[in-house]
Amino acid sequence: MEDAVSTASEAADAEVASDSVSTAGLRGNMGVLELIFTVVAYNGPVVVFLGFIPICVLLGNGVGTPVAFLVCGVIVTMLAVGLLTMSARLKKPGGFYALITAGLGRVAGLGSGFAALTCYFMSLLGAYALGGMAFNAAVVNVFHGPQAPWWVWAVLMLVVTSVLGHFNISFSSRVLTVFLACELLLMIAYDISVLAKGGAHGIGFDSFTPGQAFSGSISIAFLFGIGLFGGFEATVIFRDEVRRPERTIPVATYGVVALLAVVYAVTAWCFINSYGAAAVIDAVSKNPLGASTDSIQQYTGQFAYDAATIMLFTSSFALALAAHNITARYLFNLGADGILPRRFGQAHERHVSPHRASFALSAATLLVLVGFVIAQVPETSLYARLAGLYSYAFVILLVLVSLAVGVFLLRDRAHGKATGQAVASLMAFAILCVMLFLATENFTLLSGATGAMKDVLIIAIWGVTLAGGGLAFYLKRKRPGVYNSIGRQ
């Protein structure tokens, strides 16, 4: 009798899993530029310029920072080559979750799915914390309005993001395109101004000399630099929501990596020249949070300075919206596979969007933000620790996916050999393993957490990943139908 019940349960699991995959798909009509802008918006270019580049110069390899950004772009491209080849053969959505499952099996795949969900959720929370602070600064400093707690503006951002997340991704992509265009225009205007005025002491190329490129802490520079490309694989997770995915996804992925590498390297180089190679370290040491805005005011004027203050908020909002969309799709895929409640994996009949996953994500985000407010966590340390958690989890995901891609391409004989792409992915895997070690050793620099808090945060990230793998073992024994559907299989 027990065997009969078990067999019936397995059959039901398999039937529901099959039905969920066939009926719960998302649809969209994004083109190459819309997809590029949606993913690049996740990186928050103005956030990187104002808050990240000075820190990279200070703690990384100093004047050689632009070279570190370009080298990290090459490393990510090595991974992207294999990732795109694998994705084209699988033709499935799911991002890291689907790719790692196909390459390393369902246990590692579900662990990576939980890690990815945690990674992008931390990024989303950090974007709200930063956005709340940035909006308050814009209201007070630019519009001379009243000061309010950061969480008031964060909740306002959450409401708007939730509304946009309810609709089809094409609607959000238009909003992100507008915001990102403004950010890029500001950065281009700044770069041109610095170059036209000759910087502080003439335009120098010290950044690209071996002596500067290998100066300072190269390991920290690469660790920070690799984080600049976070979300590049989101082009794959939007597979069902783009036009002609076989063409759109590869072009958009390489476009994202190239755009980020060039824009950040050129802007970092111009920032260094705005102070001069001999003086920039002293400038960022004295004022790491204001060095970029001071440089904008000096070279581009008060209007650009005010615009940058406002765009720090709009960039944070764009980052939050992009992070919300990516996280909601990981929830959607886990729901469609039956790992999470299946209602999360159902698309809206009219908008064909992951509306239930989006709503659940918004509710969870609100609860966590309320918890932060009740605990009176300072917003500055909150953002730093969330950003550190995201960066660390992202490196873990890159290590897993680079190995998964290499293994899959070496093993997949049905579609022909892809030895070159597999070797590139495995080379990236070796480099990323070193970066993961460095990230663990330098977690305090990533997050600002010290002592017991540092250990708790690291254990929490690995604990979530291992919990996903443990759940896969449980499903294999108790619900094999659901287990078989892990990773959009």
Image: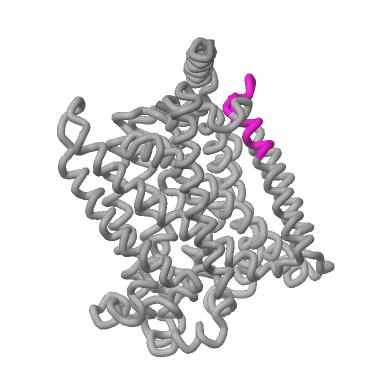
Q: Is residue 345 above or below residue 134?
A: above
Residue in front for this viewpoint, 433 or 48: 433
Quarter-of-image position of residue 220:
bottom left
Residue in front for this viewpoint, 305 or 132: 132
Quarter-of-image position of residue 140:
bottom right
Quarter-of-image position of residue 75:
bottom left
**Quadrant where the C terminus is found in the figure:** top left
| Residue at left offset 41%, top offset 66% | 439
Q: Position of residue 116 (x, y in %)?
A: 49, 46
Residue in front for this viewpoint, 168 or 34: 168
Q: Report the label total.
A: 0
Q: Is residue 54 above or below residue 379?
A: below
Q: Per the image, is 411 magenta?
A: no
Magenta stretch bounds:
345-360
In the image, is 379 to the left or to the right of 244?
Answer: right
| Residue at left offset 27%, top offset 54% | 428
| Residue at left offset 61%, top offset 58% | 126
